[in-house]
């Protein structure tokens, strides 16, 4: 866990360790969400980066007998 300071302009710097771990880049957009009493920052990714991220997931679904 990293602590940061809010500037007088309400800006924060994301620590290098976290930027590297999440592979963030300058100009990248981040969605900010209020969750309870905290702020969560979610990096927005290009759809092309999502290709294959569900590889190997089990897609079999049990269906009711009256359904096709």
Image: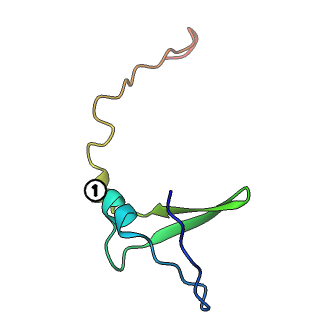
Q: Nearer the viewer, residue 36 or 51?
A: 36
Q: Residue furthest right?
A: 37
At x 61%, y 85%, the residue is 10
Q: Determine whether 65 is above or below 13 in the image.
A: above
At x 50%, y 62%, the residue is 2
Q: Indicate the quadrant where residue 59 lies.
A: top left
Give residue 24's position: percent from left, percent from top. 34, 67
Left or right: where 14 falls relative to 36 = left
Q: Kindly state the secondary structure of the residue where label 1 is placed.
A: helix
Q: Nearer the viewer, residue 36 or 13?
A: 13
Q: Determine whether 63 is above or below 25 in the image.
A: above
Q: Indicate the quadrant where residue 35 lies.
A: bottom right
The reply to whether residue 47 is visible in this rendering is yes
Give residue 5's position: percent from left, percent from top. 57, 77
At x 58%, y 86%, the residue is 7
- Counting every numbered tag in the picture gives 1
Left or right: where 3 falls relative to 50 = right
Dot 1 crowding, Cα within 10 Å, few <14, some 14–19, many 20+: few
Q: Residue furthest top?
A: 65
Question: Which residue is denoted by mark 1 in the rendering?
Answer: 49
Give residue 25's position: percent from left, percent from top. 31, 72
At x 29%, y 28%, the residue is 56
Q: Determine whether 59 is above or below 67 in the image.
A: below
Give residue 17's position: percent from left, percent from top. 35, 63
Q: Nearer the viewer, residue 60 or 56?
A: 56
Protein image colouring: rainbow
The reply to whether residue 45 is visible in this rendering is no
């Amino acid at each position: 866990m990293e602590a940061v300071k809010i500037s007088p302009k309400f800006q924060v710097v994301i620590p290098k360790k976290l930027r590297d771990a999440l592979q963030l880049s300058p100009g990248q957009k981040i969605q900010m969400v209020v969750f309870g009493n905290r702020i969560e920052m979610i990096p927005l990714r290009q759809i092309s980066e999502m290709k294959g991220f569900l590889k190997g997931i089990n897609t079999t679904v049990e269906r009711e007998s009256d359904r096709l």
